[in-house]
C-alpha cells in the first residue's frame, strides 16, 4: 500500500486507530502491574531506578506497537524503535528486577509484556526462542531477588502467552485490511493497464497492415526507378497516399473519433467495478450511438470508473446513458465519497475530460451531495 493511499483512506485510518487502541491495552501490563511493585519498594534508590526502567520499557514498547500498524513508516525508524525496545528490555533486568524483591514479582510483569511482543517483532521460530529466554530470565530474576519462582513462571509464561495471542490476532487482522486495500489499488492499476494495452493493440492493428504495404511499395519504387521512372513515380505516389491514410487513421484513434463499441465499454467498466466490490447498475441508451458520440462517452466512462475506484469507498455505482435528439448524456453516480473532499479532490482528470469534450461542443458537470458524487457529461450526436 502506498503512503498516499493509506493516508487518504479514512476507513483504513479508523481501523488503524482501533487497532492501536486495542494494542495499547498491553501497555497496562507494562505500567500498572509493575507500578504496584514500585509502590511496595521502600528503598528510594531502587524506586527511582525501577521507575526509570518501567517508563523506558513502556515508551519503547509504545514505539514498537505504533510501527507495527504503520506500513508507511520508514524502515530506519522501524529498526530504531526495535533496537530501543531491545535495549530497554535488557536494561529493565538490573533496574526493575530488585524492585519489591520477594514481595511482588515486578519484573515478571515486564517479562509477560516482552513475551507478548515477540510475535510482532520476530518470525515464529525466533519468537518462540525469545519467549523461552524471557521465561528463563524471569526465573533467574526471581532466584536472584529471593522471590517465589512459581508466580514468576505463571506470570511471564502464562500471561505472556495470552498477551502474545491477542497482539498477534490484532495485527493479523490489521494486515488483512492492508492487503485488501492493496488489492483494491492493484485492480484499479490493472484496469488502467488493460486499457493502455487495448489501445496499443488497436494502434498495432491500424498500422501493421499499412506499414507493411508501404514498405513493399517503397521497395518496388526503388527497384523500378532505373528502368521505369513513370511507374516508379506512380508507386511513390501510392506510398504517399497510404502514409497519409495511415496517419489519418492514427489521429482518429488517438483522439477517439473511430468506431467504439459502447456496449463493450459498459460491460468492461461494470466488470471492473464489480470485481472491486462495487455494485454497478447500468441503464443503456435506446439505440446505437454514432461513432463520434460513442467514443466521447467511452472516455467519460473510463474517467468516471477511475474516479470511483481511486477517490471513493463506493458500495454502489449507477451508470445511465440517454440519447435525446442531437445530444447524448451519460450520468455516473456513486456513494462512499469523503464528506470533507469535494470534486476538486480529483479534478485533474475531470479538467482534461472537460477540455476534450469542449472541443466537440460537449460539457462535464460534477457535484457532490449527501455523500453521493455525480458526474454528468453531454456530447453532441452527429450522424
Image (tube, helix red, strand yellow):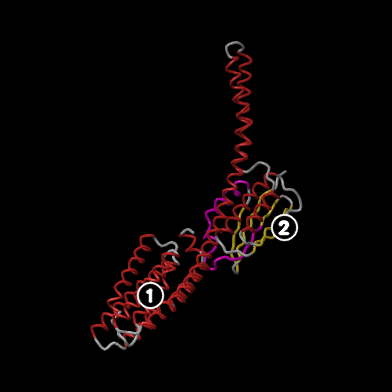
Q: Residue furthest left?
A: 45
Label 2: which secondary element:
strand
Label 1: which secondary element:
helix
| Residue 148, quarter of picture | bottom left
Which label sits on residue 309?
Answer: none
> Dots 2 and 1: beta carbons under 8 Å?
no
Above or below for 107 versus 120 = below
x, y percentage for residue 57? 34, 74
> Magenta stretch: residue 342 in it?
yes
Above or below for 146 versus 215 = below
| Residue 116, quarter of picture | bottom left
Q: Nearer the viewer, residue 21 or 85?
A: 85
**Boundaries of the magenta span:** 331-360
Q: Disc 2 to disc 1, how far (Cα)?
A: 66 Å
x, y percentage for residue 190? 57, 51
> Magenta stretch: residue 334 in it?
yes
Q: Residue furthest top?
A: 227
Dot 2, crowdedness within 10 Å: few (<14), some or many (≥20)? few
How many numbered discs?
Answer: 2
Q: Nearer the viewer, residue 73 or 285?
A: 73
| Front disc: 2 or 1 | 1
At 32% across and 68% down in the image, what residue appears?
84
Q: Nearer the viewer, residue 135 or 191?
A: 135
At 31% across and 86% down in the image, what residue appears?
102
x, y percentage for residue 128? 43, 68
x, y percentage for residue 175? 50, 65
Q: Point out the tag, 2 or 1, that comes first from the N-terminus.
A: 1
Dot 1, crowdedness within 10 Å: few (<14), some or many (≥20)? many
- Residue that label 1 marks: 135
- Residue that label 2 marks: 283
Amino acid at each position: 500500500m502506498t503512503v498516499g493511499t493509506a493516508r487518504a483512506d479514512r476507513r483504513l485510518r479508523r481501523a488503524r486507530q482501533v487497532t492501536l487502541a486495542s494494542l495499547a491495552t498491553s501497555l497496562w501490563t507494562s505500567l500498572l502491574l509493575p507500578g504496584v511493585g514500585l509502590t511496595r519498594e521502600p528503598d528510594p534508590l531502587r524506586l527511582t531506578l525501577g521507575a526509570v526502567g518501567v517508563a523506558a520499557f513502556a515508551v519503547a514498547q509504545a514505539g514498537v506497537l505504533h510501527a507495527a500498524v504503520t506500513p508507511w513508516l520508514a524502515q530506519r525508524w522501524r529498526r530504531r524503535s526495535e533496537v530501543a525496545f531491545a535495549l530497554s528490555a535488557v536494561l529493565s533486568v538490573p533496574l526493575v528486577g530488585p524492585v519489591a524483591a520477594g514481595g511482588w514479582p515486578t519484573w515478571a510483569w515486564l517479562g509477560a509484556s516482552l513475551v507478548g511482543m515477540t510475535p510482532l517483532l520476530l518470525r515464529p521460530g525466533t519468537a518462540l526462542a525469545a519467549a523461552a529466554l524471557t521465561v528463563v530470565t524471569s526465573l533467574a530474576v526471581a532466584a536472584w531477588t529471593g522471590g517465589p519462582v512459581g508466580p514468576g513462571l505463571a506470570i511471564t509464561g502464562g500471561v505472556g502467552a495470552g498477551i502474545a495471542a491477542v497482539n498477534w490476532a490484532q495485527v493479523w487482522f490489521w494486515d488483512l485490511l492492508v492487503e485488501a486495500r492493496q488489492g483494491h489499488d492493484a485492480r484499479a492499476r490493472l484496469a488502467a493497464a488493460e486499457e493502455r494495452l487495448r489501445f496499443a493493440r488497436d494502434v498495432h492493428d491500424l498500422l501493421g497492415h499499412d506499414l507493411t504495404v508501404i514498405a513493399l511499395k517503397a521497395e518496388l519504387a526503388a527497384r523500378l526507378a532505373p528502368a521505369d521512372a513513370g511507374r516508379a513515380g506512380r508507386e511513390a505516389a501510392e506510398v504517399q497516399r497510404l502514409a497519409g491514410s495511415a496517419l489519418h487513421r492514427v489521429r482518429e484513434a488517438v483522439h477517439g473519433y473511430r468506431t467504439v463499441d459502447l456496449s463493450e465499454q459498459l460491460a468492461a467498466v461494470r466488470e471492473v467495478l464489480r470485481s472491486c466490490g462495487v455494485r454497478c447498475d447500468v441503464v443503456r441508451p435506446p439505440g446505437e450511438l454514432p461513432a463520434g458520440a460513442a467514443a466521447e462517452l467511452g472516455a467519460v466512462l473510463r474517467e468516471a470508473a477511475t474516479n470511483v475506484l481511486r477517490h471513493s469507498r463506493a458500495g454502489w455505482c449507477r451508470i445511465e446513458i440517454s440519447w435525446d435528439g442531437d445530444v447524448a448524456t451519460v450520468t455516473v453516480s456513486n456513494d462512499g465519497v469523503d464528506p470533507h473532499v469535494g470534486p476538486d479532490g480529483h479534478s485533474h482528470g475531470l479538467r482534461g475530460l472537460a477540455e476534450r469534450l469542449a472541443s466537440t461542443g460537449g460539457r462535464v458537470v460534477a457535484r457532490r451531495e449527501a455523500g453521493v458524487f455525480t458526474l454528468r457529461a453531454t456530447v453532441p450526436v452527429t450522424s
